[in-house]
Image: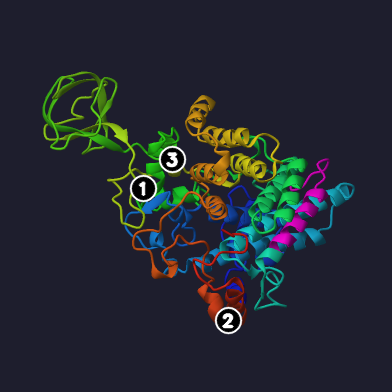
Amino acid sequence: MKKIIIAFIAMVTVLQSCERDTLTALNTDPNSYYTTVPSSLITYAEKQLSDYVNTPSVNINNFRLTMQYWQETTYSDESQYNFTTRNVSDQVFLNLYVRTLKNLDQARKLIMVYQPTPAEQGTWPVTMKNQLAIVDMLQVYTYQLSVDTFGNVPYSQSLDDVAFPLPAYDDGKAIYGSLITRLQADITNLDTTGSSFASGEKYYNGDVTKWKKFGNSLLLKLGIAIADSDDGLAKATVQTAITGGVFTSGVDDCTLAYLAASPNYSQIYANLVASNRNDFVAGKTIVDYMNSKSDPRRSEYFRQNLHYDLGKTTAVAGSTITFTLPAVLPAVTFKVGDDVFNNRTTLKVGTITSFTATTVTLSGYAVDTAKVGDLLGFSFYYDGGIIGEKSSFTGYSNPGNFAYVATTPGILLNYTEVAFYLAEAQARWNIGGDTAANLYAKAITASFVQWGKTTAAATAYITANPYDAANWKKSIGTEAWVAMYNQPLTSWNFYRRLDYPVLLPAVGAVSEANNKVPVRLLYPVTEQSTNPTNYQAAGTAIGGNFLYTKIFWDKF
């Protein structure tokens, strides 16, 4: 790990809202890692953490593919669980340990030695305490990601590369116990009567009250995660979190507000738009399920770029178009009110106001938007690429419009996720604060609202898909999978813990997956060569360094 850390000590550009002199120092001085102010390190670490959690880059985060939300177009390797060609695990380690944890640790050290100005003397003890608690909560969040991804990982020796250039891998269960203890102390240490970071902290802009609610919500997440491996600790941790006060609406969400300009736009936008590539389409598994439920969220999750065949244009007279019917008639028939599209240009031609068997008259028709010979389509439908097979970008539904917007926020933890945890807490221990059915409904409603849908639409969906107390893992697990569409790392946790939905392995899955959907990532290749003794010991301790080896809390 020492080689990894040394290679990434020089930091790159951070959010543009940092002070200009700080940006200059970070970009030109390779020793700035040790000398810069805490706020710039917090900014950098928060952005790196959000970038990792939210990016769809096949070089580092393939969980949209693993959870079968998206499918690849040009390549199929990562959807088939080939994570070794691109050294994905190495990139995950770099992001979590070097770009995030190491920078947070350096921020902690700078806070500890900071000398307050005379004007700050009276408030600095509380401010320092709050700053240290926030930094530690971010580290707790990051370490949990590492354990949930790999199992046993470097922890107690992970941040001191001088004393421990070849860090040992701590037991995952022991790490979780330590993280719970640390987080509870952090929450206690937060003083909402004081301040924290005046600048640089981008998730909550230093709001201590919001950070306290985040801390309790993260504690809830930690507790729920170990429900099947340590029921007593899990229940006690969850109860403490709920009593302390967790998220109650989307206002509480922990997100990073990305900017419109490079390099600070959304990582989804960076990979889908700025890269000028069309690498992903919707996955068949999620599309088929949502189609079967007529789920209103489809219009947000996926673009409406597929149209039913209307026919081939043979004549255009005013706003009336004559066409020949397709050889294979579509599953639905066109009707008044349907939009008509030109499949050649992808542009909307108009809206049907009247029709015969082979003509449509349109409102909103613009001259020359349809010409003789053009193939026309009407309305729209959703279709997903087969998981593991290269899928045409134009032949399947594309990711939703949110993915093509530069400022789409990066989600770290949100109310929808917390609401599903509360439903699970009630189903397991009767401590969620309401009936399991009501909490299940609140979680689904939170997802609908998150995606801009109405509570009435959510109510109709819940009525058609009610909570099943006899099979609560299926009810909560499946609906959480749908709701976590843009939170694939969280979705992966729900899937492994609740064992729903039942996902089949990808077509052409690599043999290393053992004909299963992966439940962990392999340890980094660089660790095998630079830290071989601890690498081997870690693999042996968890039962084998395999994609199908379950981590300690994944019991069923």
Residue 229 spot, x, y in % from top left = 66, 59
Q: Which mark is residue 301?
A: 3
Q: Quadrant of residue 286?
A: top left
Residue 490 spot, x, y in % from top left = 56, 51
The residue sitting at the top extreme is 354
**Contact flag, marks 2 and 3 (Cβ < 8 Å):** no
Residue 149 spot, x, y in % from top left = 56, 62
Q: State the SS at label 2.
A: helix
Q: Is there any visible trace of residue 234 in the rendered image?
A: yes
**Contact flag, marks 1 and 2 (Cβ < 8 Å):** no
Q: Is there any visible trace of residue 321 in the rendered image?
A: no
Residue 99 spot, x, y in % from top left = 60, 62
Q: Which mark is residue 284?
A: 1
Q: Which residue is mark 2?
A: 532
Q: Amino acid at mark 1?
A: Lys
Q: Horizontally, is 467 left or right of 68 in the view?
A: right
Give the Cα separation between the discs numbered 1 and 2.
40 Å
Q: Horizontally, is 201 left or right of 360 in the view?
A: right
Query: Which of marks 3 and 1 precedes in the sequence?
Result: 1
